[in-house]
Image (spheres, helix red, strand yellow):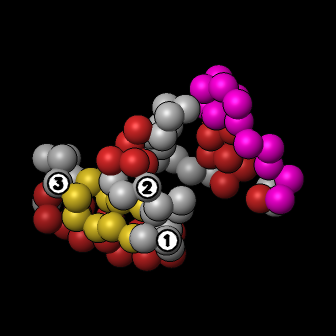
Amino acid sequence: MMFSEIEQPETYEQRKALAEKTCDELHIATTVVIDDMENTVREAYGGLPNSAYIIDRGGVIVHKEAWARPTEWPDVLRGLVEEES
């Protein structure tokens, strides 16, 4: 999927369908949260366009990035799993 080929969703249903397609194509097997059309969550976390947060089971932000770098997530997630063991 090329980002230049993606049309901006105009409804929540379109946003959800795009998220599902992305998860399928990228083989994402984790929970993905979809913001509402007003971007309420994004605004609450600072309004950055491509930020990423990893939140532990207790609701604590354990990792944040102003620009999402998925290559760093496995190490963070492994650390969380090890802490729970």
Question: For the residues carrying marks 2 and 1, which lies nearer the camera in this image?
Answer: 2
Secondary structure of residue under mark 2: loop
Asked whether disc 2 touches disc 1, contact meaning CB atoms under 8 Å apart, the reply is no
Q: Which residue is under mark 2? A: 47
At a point 71% along the width and 36% down the height, the residue shown is 9
Q: Is residue 74 visible?
A: no
Residue range of the region highlighted in magenta in the rendering: 4-17
In this view, the residue in front, 45 or 58, is 45
**Residue in front for this viewpoint, 25 or 33:** 33
- Position of 60 compared to 75: left or right? left
Residue drawn where x is 43% and y is 76% of the image: 72
- Determine which residue is flagged by label 3: 60
Apparent side of residue 16 relative to residue 66 in the rendered image (left or right): right
Of the residues under marks 3 and 1, which one precedes in the sequence?
3
Name the quadrant containing residue 15. Answer: top right
Residue 9: say if magenta: yes
Is-magenta flag for residue 3? Answer: no
Find residue 18 and report its horizontal and vertical position in percent: 69, 38
Whether residue 15 is visible here, answered yes or no, is yes
49, 16: nearer the viewer:
49
| 52 left or right of 7 in image | left
State the CA–CA distance, disc 2 to disc 1. Answer: 12 Å
Residue with the mark numbered 1: 67
Q: Residue furthest right?
A: 5
Q: Quadrant of the C terminus?
A: bottom left
Q: Amino acid at mark 2?
A: Gly
